[in-house]
């Protein structure tokens, strides 16, 4: 689960991480009022709040000098799609902006914390190349990224933070502030079960202070049951409605841009199914794992979600009946077909528990379903069906 910049900064402030004063606004008038409330003679920065990076390059961030300019910029972007390199060509609709006071910037740095699966440790990462995508730095100049692995028994140590600060070339008077900043970041990660925190850019002001000019946080979905206040920060507007619906039925669904809907039980088999569809010359429209013990209700919900995608031209159902019985799957498919208009071809490959009963249920249903001998046969038939 991801949250907006203004929400991330709210969390970080609780743990002593320095941010600039800011106010979130949902309308042009609120943006103008926010600039006036922040006071001073400006400038202020108005930033679109969407779950994607590259907002500045996409035209979603602007330095304004008057409250009226804040109003005008908010009016220009609220309610409209913002396209960045992370949103895809359709962009994301901007529903709110963050109005933030300005500051005198001396340097822009990068600071982040993520779980390093190679070492099974949280890693604190820093780079002097702030303000640009860290992936670009990692690809072109990996030597400019400095890392410190954090031992979970003792936590982030002061000397580790100061070592990173020195590697960034911070002046001596700012090393202590950097250590305090990094410690606050680490405490925020532990307190919220965050899987990722990025401060990009982390700003060194001309006065020698360190401030989070931007903030990004992502959380481990499996730990959200412990954090009701973070669950409340979820913004459905930023999520694929099909994925939100899938979560209600405990389905693992990710929408893609192909035209062959895939329904599979088991994540490994689902990935293999997507691969074999590609090998057969097609393109999967989704990843969908109904799980090992899926009920008839879950199967029906899965098929409805797949068919809600207007790009889907054929459906490939690939089930290996271990825990999940093939007759349950077949009953779910028939039930879903009665609830929706089944207007696209369906190819089914089933093997395993109660496979003969499952095939009989489909055969007796009167549905236009094509049986497949194996995965490869099913993929070829689904691709052919999608092509018309």
Image (spheres, rainbow, N blue to C red):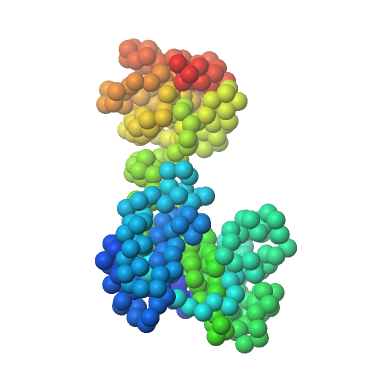
Tally the marks.
0
Q: Residue at image x 43%, y 35%?
A: 290
Judge by depth and name the residue closer to the eye, 332 or 337: 337
Q: Is the N terminus in the top left, top right, bottom left or bottom right quadrant?
A: bottom left
Q: Which of the 4 image quarters holds residue 294?
A: top left
Judge by depth and name the residue closer to the eye, 96 or 232: 96
Q: Residue furthest right?
A: 143
Q: Position of residue 102 (x, y in %)?
A: 45, 76
Whether residue 140 is situated above or below residue 210 in the rendered picture: above
Q: Is the C terminus in the top left, top right, bottom left or bottom right quadrant?
A: top left
Whether residue 100 is situated above or below residue 373 in the rendered picture: below
Judge by depth and name the residue closer to the eye, 28 or 15: 28
Residue 164 falls left or right of residue 8: right
Does any portion of residue 325 appear in the rendered image? Answer: no
Judge by depth and name the residue closer to the eye, 33 or 156: 33
Q: Residue at image x 45%, y 40%?
A: 254
Q: Residue at image x 57%, y 23%?
A: 281
Whether residue 155 is situated above or below residue 28 in the rendered picture: below
Q: Residue at image x 58%, y 58%?
A: 133
Q: Position of residue 306 (x, y in %)?
A: 39, 31
Does any portion of residue 249 appear in the rendered image? Answer: yes
Residue 57 falls left or right of residue 7: right
Q: Position of residue 88 (x, y in %)?
A: 48, 44
Whether residue 142 is situated above or below residue 89 in the rendered picture: below
Q: Position of residue 251 (x, y in %)?
A: 40, 40
Q: Residue furthest bottom?
A: 173
């Amino acid at each position: 689960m991801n949250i907006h910049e203004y929400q991330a900064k709210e969390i970080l402030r609780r743990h002593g991480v320095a941010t600039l004063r800011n106010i979130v606004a949902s309308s042009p008038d609120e943006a103008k009022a926010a600039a006036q409330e922040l006071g001073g003679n400006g400038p202020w920065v108005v930033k679109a709040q969407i779950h994607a990076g590259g907002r500045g390059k996409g035209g979603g961030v602007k330095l304004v000098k008057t409250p009226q300019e804040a109003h005008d910029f908010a009016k220009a972007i609220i309610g409209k799609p913002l396209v960045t390199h992370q949103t895809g060509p359709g962009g994301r609709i901007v529903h709110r902006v963050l109005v933030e006071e300005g500051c005198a910037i001396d340097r822009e740095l990068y600071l982040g914390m993520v779980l390093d699966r190679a070492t099974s440790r949280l890693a604190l990462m820093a780079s002097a190349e702030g303000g640009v995508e860290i992936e670009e730095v990692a690809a072109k100049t990996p030597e400019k990224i400095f890392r410190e692995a954090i031992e979970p028994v003792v936590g982030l140590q002061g000397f580790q933070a100061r070592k990173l600060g020195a590697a960034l070339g911070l002046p001596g008077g700012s090393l202590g502030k950097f250590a305090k900043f990094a410690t606050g970041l680490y405490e925020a990660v532990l307190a919220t079960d965050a899987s990722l925190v990025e401060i990009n850019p982390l700003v060194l002001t001309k006065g020698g202070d360190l401030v989070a000019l931007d903030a990004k946080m992502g959380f481990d979905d499996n730990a959200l049951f412990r954090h009701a206040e973070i669950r409340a920060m979820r913004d459905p507007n930023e999520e694929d409605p099909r994925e939100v619906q899938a979560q209600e039925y405990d389905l693992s669904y990710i929408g893609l841009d192909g035209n062959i809907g895939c329904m599979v039980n088991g994540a490994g088999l689902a990935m293999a199914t997507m691969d074999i569809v590609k090998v057969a010359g097609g393109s999967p429209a989704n990843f969908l794992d109904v799980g090992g013990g899926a009920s008839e209700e879950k199967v029906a919900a899965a098929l409805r979600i797949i068919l809600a995608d207007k790009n889907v031209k054929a459906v490939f159902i690939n089930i290996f009946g271990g825990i999940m019985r093939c007759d349950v799957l077949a009953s779910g498919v028939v039930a879903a077909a009665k609830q929706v208009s089944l207007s696209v071809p369906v190819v089914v490959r089933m093997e395993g528990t109660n496979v003969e009963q499952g095939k009989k249920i489909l055969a007796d249903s009167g549905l236009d379903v094509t049986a497949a001998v194996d995965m490869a046969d099913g993929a070829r038939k689904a691709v052919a069906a999608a092509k018309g």
